[in-house]
Image (cartoon, rainbow, N blue to C red):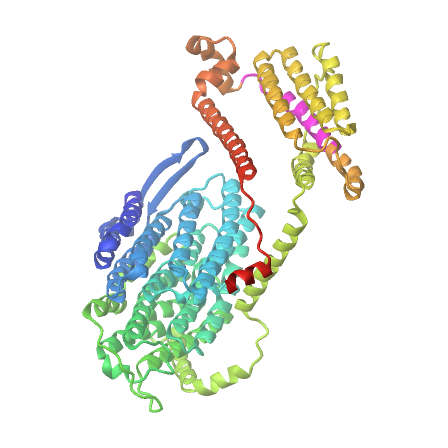
């Protein structure tokens, strides 16, 4: 599994060089790794569906327990069909879409393949930290794909919006992962499923993880980034925002639902926010004129539907969720690709300008009809089977709730209505509009578009395949006496009646679309997610400017004061609350420490009282030499030698600088007013450092493992009786060489600046003054 992920990323790194020569070759080459991953996963389908899981672990930081843990089970198999299968289809389609090549084509091929590899890593992950790594890789790839070259303001804004919302949600999710992993004692998802943790920490982790899932899968109130991301080229929208990336949040909920089955802080927000998202997304889609925006809000609605099903944490809900997850990927990929062909061939995707395309492109109209039929939940499509299972989940499942079913039926009405709006708006003859001129699409565009639609009807007719796949995933939940099975016909029952009501109500909403849109335009709109996002970002910008203006004032004392206050508040509070004074505390170990300490203290006070710069520098040197003397007394002559050398060089450097500064210090009235606060902060920081040194030195262990190894090998391996010297010169020689190199570079830079300043002064001294011409002189020259 890791091999497939690595191959995706390696080929993506090589594709830019191939794309410079031929974008067609780049897209077709990019389709090979996902197709190979799909074939391998399908070859493992038999054992996986029989209950066997394929695991793989690669240690990448074993000392701290970090590893890439992968697992192929029924849910990973289902998601791989979408990620790898639709990835290969979209990449082949992209070759016909980007007919002119150019920068977008050369950029999209490697990024799409890298995104596919990151999604495969996410799908296979069996470790929470591994999930987060690939989660953020998908976020970065999405940002680059949506933004493209960043030439337009809209693309930059949309890409940044998607990045901000999903990455911030990811950080909250990471905190939830840490809380869950630490409370359970493991970060392996399979172990968490086998032994679900409980308690307050688990409830907190559930809420934090849901935030990440909501942002990634565009749930209310984080849904606005997905429609904005429709500025990306259509193949990117089809893959990222229909079949792959936006499924990541739903996939995470499906993966962790068995862990949080008995946690109301998990299933209650998932169901509540999912239902609201389903209604809001469907309502917005019902009034859109841009076909891509219509499908985008439809995706938001369907993601809310999936969140309800997987968040419920029941066997039937899991069956319905798996079926709808697969169906949604198929029909939404088809419809996005259809819209791409319409936009590409007709030059517009505005339904107010399209008319008669059904007669001009009959094959495309048939393909779109199959996709719309599955989205609306009509038999014998897979969407119909999943929708019936969804209605059954809240009638016969573990949490019967008629209110949830009523909202699902209402949301399904909206789904049918915007499905018909999409089909009518794209292909119907509109008497008030002229026939739209459009070229016939090529087979290279039609075949990839038709494949997901045909797969949707094939899986609907061959429902035992979908049932086995969904049942293998749902078996991780609490079994019921009579488990639900996917089928085209369950007899005349309540779910069938609800499906009929949803279709009938959706048709009625579509027929009254004009009156409905007019009524919607008259309604007040107090809440708008996009406006709220823009106001929050503007507020953050104002706060950032205000904080920067207060803190970044160009004053070194201010910066030092902020650093010292931060040190006092964060580690200082922990030191006061938890640390204790060592038991065997002595005033001094050697009598010579007392006079040296007095010299250092007196010199430090003298620095504060001095008015001349040279006096202050000399006293600072006395402080440094006094500390070197303490090193000698404490048995560290090598440290003392280094201290004496540094102090001498520093003193010489100060003397050179002081030649260009005034002899005395100057102090403004403002600085004098701040002397008392500065003294308090400096004194508190000094006390903190002194206490920390005493407490930390008393907390030493007798012989840590690393110290034992150094002591044992110092004389025998390095020929040194001084362990510190052996560490610096032998055991960590490369570190020492690096430090010397840094010092050499710094010295070279200082020397270069000195030489440059001398050269500039020499040029200024030898420069011939240019006479300035008066206006009268200039006029005289002009007359001559």
Taking the view exactly as shown, the residue that stands out farthest to the front is 784
Residue 690 inside the magenta-drawn segment: yes
| 376 relative to 553, above or below | below
Q: Position of residue 756 (x, y in %)?
A: 51, 35
Q: Position of residue 506 (x, y in %)?
A: 41, 80
The kind of secondary structure the magenta stretch mainly shows is helix
Q: Is residue 423 left or right of residue 763?
A: left
Q: Position of residue 400 (x, y in %)?
A: 48, 66
Residue 741 visible to an observer of this rendering:
yes
Given residues 383 and 195, the one toward you in this image is: 383
Taking the view exactly as shown, the residue that stands out farthest to the left is 443
Given residues 743 and 106, the one toward you in this image is: 743
Given residues 244 and 506, the one toward you in this image is: 244
Q: Residue at x 46, y 69 (%)?
A: 278
Q: Is residue 378 left or right of residue 168?
A: left
Q: Residue at x 64, y 16 (%)?
A: 628
Examine the image and state in which quarter residue 395 appears. bottom left
Examine the image and state in which quarter residue 558 appears. top right
| 433 relative to 710, above or below | below
Examine the image and state in which quarter residue 590 appears. top right
Given residues 569 and 410, the one toward you in this image is: 569
Q: Residue at x 63, y 30 (%)?
A: 657
Q: Position of residue 154 (x, y in %)?
A: 45, 66
Q: Is residue 10 left or right of residue 612?
A: left
Q: Quadrant of the N terminus?
A: top left
Taking the view exactly as shown, the residue that stands out farthest to the bottom is 431
Residue 783 inside the magenta-drawn segment: no
Residue 396 visible to an observer of this rendering:
no
| 183 relative to 703, above or below | below
Q: Which residues make up the magenta segment?
A: 683-703
How many badges with numbers are in the image?
0
């Amino acid at each position: 599994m890791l091999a497939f992920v690595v191959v995706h990323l390696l080929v993506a790194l090589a594709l830019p060089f191939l794309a410079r020569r031929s974008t067609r070759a780049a897209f077709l080459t990019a389709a090979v790794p996902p197709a190979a991953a799909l074939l391998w996963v399908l070859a493992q389908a038999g054992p996986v569906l029989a209950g066997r899981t394929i695991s793989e672990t690669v240690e990448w930081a074993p000392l701290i327990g970090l590893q890439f843990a992968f697992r192929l089970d029924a849910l990973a198999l289902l998601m791989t069909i979408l990620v790898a299968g639709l990835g290969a289809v979209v990449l082949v389609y992209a070759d016909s879409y980007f007919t002119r090549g150019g920068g977008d084509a050369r950029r999209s091929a490697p990024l799409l393949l890298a995104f596919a590899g990151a999604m495969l890593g996410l799908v296979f992950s069996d470790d929470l930290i591994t999930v987060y790594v690939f989660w953020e890789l998908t976020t970065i790839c999405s940002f680059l794909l949506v933004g493209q070259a960043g030439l337009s303001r809209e693309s930059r804004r949309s890409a940044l919006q998607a990045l901000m919302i999903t990455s911030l949600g990811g950080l909250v999710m990471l905190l939830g992962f840490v809380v869950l992993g630490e409370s359970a004692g493991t970060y392996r998802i399979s172990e968490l499923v086998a032994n679900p943790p409980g308690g307050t920490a688990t409830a907190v982790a559930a809420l934090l993880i849901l935030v990440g899932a909501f942002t990634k899968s565009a749930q209310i109130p984080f849904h606005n980034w997905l429609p904005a991301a429709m500025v990306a080229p259509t193949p990117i929208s089809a893959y990222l925002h229909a079949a792959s990336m936006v499924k990541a949040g739903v996939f995470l909920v499906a993966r962790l639902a068995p862990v949080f089955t008995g946690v109301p802080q998990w299933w209650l927000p998932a169901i509540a926010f999912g239902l609201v998202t389903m209604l809001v997304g469907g309502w917005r889609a019902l009034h859109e004129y841009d076909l891509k925006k219509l499908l985008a809000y439809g995706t938001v609605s369907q993601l809310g539907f999936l969140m309800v099903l997987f968040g419920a944490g029941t066997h039937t809900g899991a069956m319905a969720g798996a079926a709808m997850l697969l169906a949604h990927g198929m029909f939404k990929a088809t419809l996005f690709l259809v819209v791409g062909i319409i936009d590409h061939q007709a030059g517009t995707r505005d339904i107010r300008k399209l008319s008669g395309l059904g007669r001009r492109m009959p094959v495309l109209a048939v393909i779109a009809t199959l996709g719309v039929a599955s989205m609306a939940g009509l038999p014998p499509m897979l969407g119909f089977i999943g929708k019936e299972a969804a209605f059954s989940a809240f009638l016969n499942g573990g949490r019967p709730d008629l209110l949830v079913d009523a909202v699902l039926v209402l949301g399904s009405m909206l789904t049918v209505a915007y499905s018909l709006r999409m089909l009518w708006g794209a292909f119907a003859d509109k008497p008030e509009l002229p026939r739209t001129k459009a070229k016939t699409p090529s087979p290279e565009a039609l075949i990839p578009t038709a494949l997901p639609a045909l797969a949707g009807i094939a899986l609907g007719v061959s429902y035992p395949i979908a049932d086995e796949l969904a049942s293998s995933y749902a078996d991780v939940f609490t079994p019921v006496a009579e488990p639900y099975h996917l089928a085209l016909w369950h007899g005349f029952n309540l779910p069938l009646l609800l499906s009929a009501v949803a279709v009938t109500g959706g048709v009625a909403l579509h027929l009254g679309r004009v009156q409905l849109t007019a009524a919607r335009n008259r309604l007040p709109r107090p809440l708008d997610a996009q406006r709220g996002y823009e106001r929050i970002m503007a507020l953050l910008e104002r706060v950032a400017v205000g904080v920067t203006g207060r803190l970044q004032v160009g004053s070194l004392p201010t910066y030092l004061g902020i650093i010292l206050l931060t040190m006092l508040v964060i580690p200082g509070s922990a030191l006061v609350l938890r640390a204790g004074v060592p038991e065997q505390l002595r005033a001094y170990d050697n009598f010579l420490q007392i006079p040296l300490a007095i010299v250092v203290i007196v010199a430090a006070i003298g620095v504060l009282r001095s008015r001349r710069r040279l006096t202050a520098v000399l006293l600072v040197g006395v402080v440094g030499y006094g500390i070197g003397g303490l090193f000698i007394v404490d048995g560290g002559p090598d440290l003392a030698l280094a201290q004496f050398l540094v102090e001498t060089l520093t003193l010489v450097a100060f003397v050179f600088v002081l030649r260009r500064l005034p002899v005395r210090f100057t102090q403004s009235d403002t600085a004098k007013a701040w002397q008392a606060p500065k003294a308090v902060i400096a004194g508190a920081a000094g006390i903190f450092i002194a206490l920390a040194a005493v407490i930390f030195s008393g907390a030493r262990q007798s012989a840590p493992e690393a110290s034992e190894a150094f002591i044992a090998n110092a004389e025998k391996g390095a020929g040194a009786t001084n362990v510190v010297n052996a560490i610096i010169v032998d055991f960590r020689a490369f570190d020492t060489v690096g430090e010397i190199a840094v010092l050499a570079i710094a010295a070279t830079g200082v020397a270069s600046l000195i030489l440059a300043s001398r050269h500039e002064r020499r040029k200024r001294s030898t420069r011939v003054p240019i006479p300035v011409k008066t206006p009268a002189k200039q006029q005289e020259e002009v007359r001559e």
